[in-house]
Image (spheres, grey):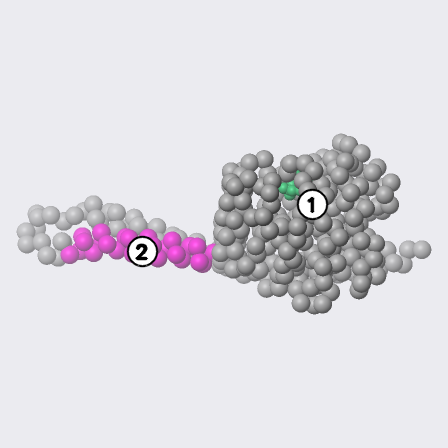
Amino acid sequence: MKLVIMIPCLNEEATLPLVLKSIPKQIKGIDKIETLIIDDGSSDKTRAVAKALGVKHFLIHTTNQGLSRSFRHGLNRALEMGADIIVLTEGDNQYPQSKIPDLIKPILNGTADTVIADRQTQTIAHFSRRKKFFQKLGTGVLNLAAGTNVPDAISGFRAYSRTAAMQINPIADYSWATETTIQAAHKGHKIAILPIKTNPMLRESRQFKNSWQHIRRSSVTIVRAFIMYRPYALFFSVSALLLVVGLIPLINFLVTDLTATHPLGPHHLQSLIIGSMLIVGAFVSFTLGVIADLIRINRMLLEDLLEISKKQSYTSKLARLVKKP
Ligand SMILES: Nc1nc2c(ncn2[C@@H]2O[C@H](COP(=O)(O)OP(=O)(O)O)[C@@H](O)[C@H]2O)c(=O)[nH]1
Ligand SMILES: [Mg+2]
């Protein structure tokens, strides 16, 4: 069993040594532990510091590409390296690496495909009340959209089985955590939760400069996920709403028209126009739902093909690596 611990880093020379030193050297049930540093265009000595502490695997972005892409590229590299389990942690020593054995236990036992650490954010002293509120709100909306019960939707301390890592295909440039949680839920992955206590803060989060930016990005991800995974739920609901609202003025027109005693009496033409427009809108929304659902089915087939091709490609790359003296 091979465990790859991937750490995306953007200028983490100060805190990375603490992270690397706290990674357990041995874990029961694991034969090999390897660390993969994803250097996301650091301009400091992140790489040199990691090398000096024995890290052998690096994925280098020559320019800063953001955490979502770093995560996506890192996941693929870890699979290429032959990881059976992949752990994600951060370079700012926010998470307790000593808990990695507990984090991967459900995967080793075969009881989960993904494990997400729960920071128990409501108890973190340095989180403001506003931050706690938005964290709770965001997590609530995500759970509603994904049908999950994850207490900390944006936790960056996670473990994935090889199969789970092959099946998630993050595409967004932001909100990888929200996106991959939704994908895991839709793929039917079993998600386990590990409550943890984070380490004392060494620096502010650089990812979320303000709550509004975070909300905007997460909302886009959640709406997009709805359109991707449950388009009929969205478009058919809009269609049904427009249909009902449109029928009211239309019936009003028909009733007044049929009951008019004089041909030049009131006909409520406005009701006819508004009702017709709303019903056309309902039809358009219904049609979009059908098309989006067909695209969803196609994407599911493509994702199955992608998984097969990833399996083949990673297995042959691994075989070549093993053959090398
Ligand atoms: N902020 C930021 N972090 C990055 C980027 N690329 C990689 N990272 C790494 O992603 C992890 C999370 O960033 P951090 O600022 O701690 O944000 P947090 O997730 O809110 O704690 C750290 O290990 C960073 O070094 C990037 O473009 N921006
Ligand atoms: Mg952090």
Residue lying at 14% horizontally and 49% vertically, measured from the top left: 267
Left/right of residue 206 with respect to residue 141 in the rendered view: right
Residue 41: image x %, image y %?
A: 73, 36
Going by the numbered disc 1, the residue's amino acid type is Asn
Q: Residues within 10 Å of mark 1 (few under 14, many from 20)?
A: few
Label number found at residue 111: none
Residue at far bottom of view: 110
Considering every residue shown, the one lying at the far top of the view is 43
First to last magenta residue range: 231-255
The residue sitting at the right extreme is 325
Residue under label 1: 199
User: Can see residue 137?
Assistant: yes
Where 173 falls versus 182 (above or below)? above
Predominant secondary structure, magenta span: helix
Q: Which residue corresponds to mark 2? A: 243
Say which of 286 and 77 sits in front.
77
Q: Nearer the viewer, residue 136 or 240?
A: 136
Front-most of residues 249 and 34: 34
| Quarter of the figure that contains the N terminus | bottom right
x%, y% of residue 16? Answer: 77, 41
- Residue at image location 13% in from the left, 57% down from the top: 258
Report which quarter residue 261 is drawn in: bottom left
Q: Is residue 105 left or right of residue 190?
A: right
Query: Closer to the N terminus: mark 2 or mark 1?
Result: 1
Residue at (13%, 53%) from the top-left corner? 256
Quadrant of image for the C terminus: bottom right
Q: Quadrant of ligand 2?
A: top right
Indicate the secondary structure of the residue bearing disc 2: helix
Is residue 232 found inside the magenta-colored segment of the image? yes
Q: Quadrant of residue 270?
A: top left
- Amino acid type indicated by mark 2: Leu
Question: Dot 2: few (<14), some (14–19), or many (≥20) neighbours within 10 Å?
Answer: many
